[in-house]
Amino acid sequence: MMKKKENFSEWFDEVLFNADVVDSRYPVKGFAVYKGWGSKIVRGITEMLEKELEATGHDPMLFPVVIPEESFAKEAEHIKGFHAEVFWITRAGDRKLKRSMLLRPTSETAIYPLFTYWIRSHADLPLKMHQSVCVYRYETKATRPLLRMREFLWNEAHTAHADWEDAEREVHEVVGIYNRVYKSLGLSYLTLKRPDFDKFAGADYSLAFDAWNPDGRVNQIGTAHNLGENFSKAFELTYEDVDGSHKNVLTTCHGFGISRTLAAITAQHGDDHGLVLPPEIAPIQVVVVPIPYKEVDAEVMEYAKQVYEEIRNAGIRVHLDDDEKMQPGEKFYHWEMYGVPVRAEVGPKDLKDRSVTLSERDNLERTKVSFSNLISGIDELFRKIIVNISRNSQAELENSIVEATTMSGLKRAVRNRKIARTSWCGGIACAEKIKEESGGEIRGHRFDLDEEPENPCPVCDGRPEKVIYVARAY
Amino acid sequence: MMKKKENFSEWFDEVLFNADVVDSRYPVKGFAVYKGWGSKIVRGITEMLEKELEATGHDPMLFPVVIPEESFAKEAEHIKGFHAEVFWITRAGDRKLKRSMLLRPTSETAIYPLFTYWIRSHADLPLKMHQSVCVYRYETKATRPLLRMREFLWNEAHTAHADWEDAEREVHEVVGIYNRVYKSLGLSYLTLKRPDFDKFAGADYSLAFDAWNPDGRVNQIGTAHNLGENFSKAFELTYEDVDGSHKNVLTTCHGFGISRTLAAITAQHGDDHGLVLPPEIAPIQVVVVPIPYKEVDAEVMEYAKQVYEEIRNAGIRVHLDDDEKMQPGEKFYHWEMYGVPVRAEVGPKDLKDRSVTLSERDNLERTKVSFSNLISGIDELFRKIIVNISRNSQAELENSIVEATTMSGLKRAVRNRKIARTSWCGGIACAEKIKEESGGEIRGHRFDLDEEPENPCPVCDGRPEKVIYVARAY
């Protein structure tokens, strides 16, 4: 297999293919098939996120995939931002449709017409919903599995509020939820406020989570937007307040990239043996591999079954690989590719002293535990693995950030596949120059941290407004 | 609210709307919004089905929603059967697409191109997958919420096999799975083999599950098809057998109508108070309602919390309705509409003798249980409810089947919104005459039961081939 450090791009494709995550041979560009292992990981990520969203009052819903043209066209900035990348349905059967419809690129314009029915008074607010669906964008750049697709999986949350403060509270709540999920997955990223010229089409402001990627192109795994009154004005979304007056609601929307989170898990944690999965979402958390040996063969198998039962009864997702046609070494290779967090080896020695040899997927270290300490030993490894992969990922992120005080430093950083940390005067002309000369985009300033700029803008030498991060991006 | 027996159609729409199952005001005909309660029930049904499918080796996958025209056109009968009802994507952004794509009406033609990569030898067989997705059909008849939509939710399973026997085994396995899920939901239906003129476009034969509906139009909630070599020939799906020879695989496909199963649950079990949900899929299985009373108000509330905790700790999905702005009677009305299986009332008397008053949603009967017997009492009611609603539904099904030995009897049965049981010679002309004169369709003969026809064909008086069932259908 290709080495991750030598050719990330090919390594990435190979891991996704070999571990049955995604098959990219679907005969339409930008569309791919999620296979068994991939689908199960997707389900794990989705369930984790939905649980958090529903615990904070976001109701699960399912809106249609089609949006009528009139609804889509209502908010001027929104259609300007999205119209070049939507798929249009113009015919059905042998007929031309009277009204064209588009496949949702995002669902604000599908959802707000219904919000007008559901919101009458302040008692109907806040209104909070979410849905996990595929969305469709006619990407014209080169497509990449999971990272840049024309069909991708996400969860979108949409809310309506009585005032700006409540909308702000919601944005912070969702940022907290996304952070908790990403952290449970051991991911590292920058939480940034996007510059105005790059905010979501129709938003007052946009926050985004940019995960580091080994090829230096950051991977936007999530976004949170305060839309202010922009959409509520366009859709006439009003409510009657306590005092009888009619006011516009405030709306927010949030996108959690499920496909891209799966890409980040693969890219940040994976190694030359394949995937490395965080225990919480691994479809199989422990694989039991018997190591048969001559005359104790049957006894080893019997003991392996006991080990399997013990783990299963503890509520851990476990698989006993008792395939007699495969050698233990082949099995190790196979399950390492799939990223199973813990391997439990059961051989003649383990049988003899009633122990089990546990191997961690991330660093491939082995530990011997007694049968009576099996479950606590596995639980401890689960905790250790998530700590390890989080720490390594965080170190990589920090390592990939390079200070740049001049244009040549900035250009060198981007060329070296790094994220450049620099200052910016806030001017559009300077932003364009940065993009043009370095090839990187201004991804924004930190939302989670106040950073005071110490150097002038590297383009115009003018007074810096913000510390910004510049990188190529998917 | 409308009465179920007086106007089923309006009653049905009202229940779906009032219980937050579906909102049909989406501005595109045949597309609707699944709201919070509806989405949660959908999730429950889907999880129950997926668990069964995966336990029998069907791998979860996710294929794209778009199918290229060339793939769709490969199997002649299939395109003939579906082309009048597909939605076409012809543009993206401002460009006309070079190759038109359609939204999946079903996924055989999306899936088989990938099966050709995955199947090489007999060792790759059987290949079994499933996915829970929305499908799209341009219905030209009047649309109805959940029952006849242009976008609907289903689970589709697709499999490939080395020989006919294994394909047959698969069809029986899936029929068994669907039966178990439908039975867990208390549904009653006929399992029929469709006549050849009504089989799935491209199938060797089609089985279907027709659920009874109060308006006399049967509701096809599931199908299982043996596709033989029809698709494998068109898609060149071959494998190398043990002896080195190359053979066509055999394929099967199966559709479990999730939207329509939700329709059947609503239609078969619901009453003039609203939904009646089978405990296994109820988003809330027990609602605790405190009945406050003057000076013991705080104590009642405290005890209600204890009751809530006790139920929650038993792993039952429970909600404590402690809203102080609503009267207990309003709460009863609300949760009956939502079909919550068991209501636990906690009033001053219950407080006094440390008991709880349980009320069953289906027959509204009340039982008093002591706090120490609370969980076993609830479990018993769950069992009782599913037995009751299953029995009532089965009685309605049997009651709706009417023997018809003559054309006038058959016409009368269909006119009276019944399912007519009659004989048929097997001739197409007679089938057409039956449809034309009675308005009902031949739904097929029993798959689960051998029935010997005793009367001649009511149209031609000729030798009967099968006992068939005739009804209007969605």
Image: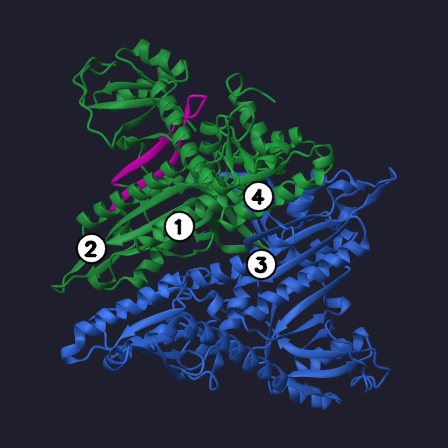
Chain colours: A blue, B green
Give the foreground label among 1 and 3.
Answer: 1
Secondary structure under tag 3 reads: loop
Q: Do the residues at discs 2 and 1 belong to one chain?
A: yes
Cβ–Cβ below 8 Å for labels 2 and 4? no
Badge 1: chain ID: B
Residue lying at 65% horizontally and 69% vertically, measured from the top left: A209
> Which label belongs to residue B307?
4
> Which label belongs to residue A137?
3
- Dot 3: few (<14), some (14–19), or many (≥20) neighbours within 10 Å? many
Give the foreground label among 2 and 4.
Answer: 4
Q: Earlier in the sequence, mark 2 or mark 4?
A: 2
Is residue B73 visible from the viewing direction of this image? no
Cβ–Cβ below 8 Å for labels 3 and 4? no
Pick the quarter of the image with the N terminus of chain B: top right
* Residue B207 screen position, x and y as percent: 29, 36
Relative placement, left or right, of A433 versus B135 is right
Amino acid type of the residue tagged 4 in the rendering: Val
Residue furthest to the front in view is B353
Residue corresponding to mark 2: B162
CA distance separating discs 3 and 4: 50 Å
Residue B451 on the magenta span: no
Which of A258 and A149 lies nearest the eye of the viewer?
Answer: A258
